[in-house]
Image (tube, rainbow, N blue to C red):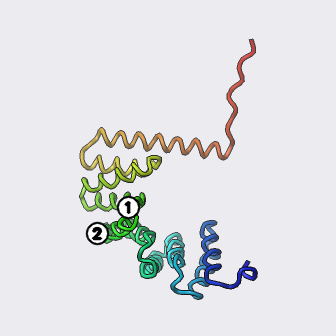
Amino acid sequence: MVRAGGDTPHLHLLLGKAYLDLYQNPKAEDELQKAIAGDPRLPFAHYDLGVLYRRLGKLDKAEEEFEKEMAISPTEPWAYEDRGTLRLEQGDADRAVPLFQKALAINPKLTPSLAGLGRAYLRQGKTEEAISYLKRAVALQPDSANYHYQLGQAYLKKGMHAEAQKQFAEQQKLQAAQVEKQAERLSGRLPPPAEPAL
């Protein structure tokens, strides 16, 4: 493919992204490094490399790559969102909030950023704000069991037990549907039972 398409940074980026999607991490890293070596300012190359490093647990390297991507593509929300998520996972809600806010300023309908900001506010003890953002995430993606669970947690913290139970019930229903769908994918759908002969 390299011979046919030429040895270009864009081609290495495409190959790197394909390997990243296939979880072929060493090949993804090799191709993304080649893309960056050919064009250090190539949009999405640093972002994809950051995603890979985060997956591999190389969090300092992931943060560096997200920083570089934010400098190259300041109007794209993805690096802000992923860096905010990384900060939140590291227990730093205060530094996660502005990153999620920046991602949402670019695209107000990013459900991971809405939910991330809600979770960050919840950790800061800002329960009303947390509920507001988590409700928006659930409204935009009502089939997310995770978002219903997070909203349920926020309602619990606020002392709104009935609302929390509704969210947890919806979460369990969605998870059960996902398990059933997965089972169907693995074994196929069984035909309905035959009618008894009269």
Q: Are marks 2 and 1 in contact (CB under 8 Å)?
A: no
Identify whether 192 is placed above or below 16.
Answer: above
**Comparing marks 2 and 1, which lies closer to the viewer?**
1
**Could you tell me which residue is drawn at 58 percent across and 88 percent down?**
37
Residue 82: x and y in percent read 44, 69
Residue 126 in which image quadrant:
bottom left
- Front-most of residues 151 and 5: 5
Q: Determine the residue positioned at 54% across, 73% down.
A: 52
Disc 1 crowd rating (10 Å Cα; few below 14, some 14-19, many 20+) is some
Amino acid type, mark 1? Pro
At a point 75% along the width and 80% down the height, the residue shown is 4
Residue 173 to residue 82: above or below: above
Between 41 and 33, the one nearer to me in the picture: 41
**Quadrant in which the N terminus is drawn:** bottom right
The residue at the point 26 percent across, 43 percent down is 160
| Residue occupied by mark 1 | 108
Tell me the kind of residue under disc 2.
Asp
Give 173 or 132, whichever is nearer the viewer. Answer: 132
Residue 177 x/y as whole percent: 53, 41
Secondary structure at numbered mark 1: loop
